[in-house]
Image (cartoon, rainbow, N blue to C red):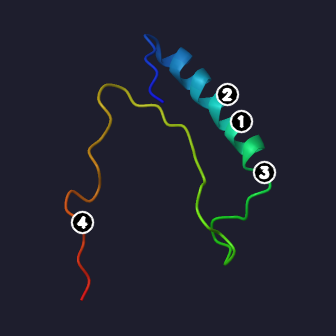
Amino acid sequence: MIALHYHDEAAIAAMRRANRLLERLQRHRPPVDSAAYTGGRFRAFSFSGLPPTRFPARRPEYS
């Protein structure tokens, strides 16, 4: 979901509320560093201006 806020304080407050809700919803999922972790962890982020480009720009190839 993308939300636009005109003030930094409002964006940070919305991000914190979303992360508190996500923590409650994901409370019973295994931790990321667990062998039982199967994915599905989410976080909310706030950016000033445009969000950063994806990193890395090119997908790494392993041989």
For this orientation, the residue located farthest to the bottom is 63
**Camera-side residue of 27 and 6:** 27
Q: How far apart are labels 4 and 2 at the CA level? A: 33 Å
In this figure, which residue is indicated by the disc labeled 3? 27
* Disc on the earlier residue, 4 or 3: 3
> Marks 4 and 1: in contact by CB < 8 Å?
no
Residue type indicated by callout 3: Arg
In the rendered image, the quadrant that contains the C terminus is bottom left
Q: Residue at x 54, y 17 (%)?
A: 9
Q: Which mark is residue 3?
A: none
Q: Using residue 3 as the reference point, say whether residue 14 is left or right of it.
A: right
Q: Using residue 61 as the reference point, say whether residue 30 is left or right of it.
A: right
Q: Residue at x 70, y 64 (%)?
A: 31
In this figure, which residue is indicated by the disc labeled 2? 17
**Camera-side residue of 62 and 56:** 62
Q: Position of residue 43 (x, y in %)?
A: 57, 43
Q: Using residue 48 as the reference point, say whether residue 42 is left or right of it.
A: right
> Marks 2 and 1: in contact by CB < 8 Å?
yes
In this figure, which residue is indicated by the disc labeled 1? 20
* Disc on the earlier residue, 1 or 3: 1
Q: Residues within 10 Å of mark 1 (few under 14, many from 20)?
A: some
Residue type indicated by callout 4: Arg
Q: Residue at x 26, y 59 (%)?
A: 56
Q: How far apart are labels 3 and 2 at the CA level? A: 15 Å
Residue type indicated by callout 1: Arg
Figure quadrant of residue 59: bottom left
Q: Is residue 28 above or below residue 20?
A: below
Residue type indicated by callout 2: Arg
Figure quadrant of residue 21: top right
Q: Which mark is residue 59?
A: 4
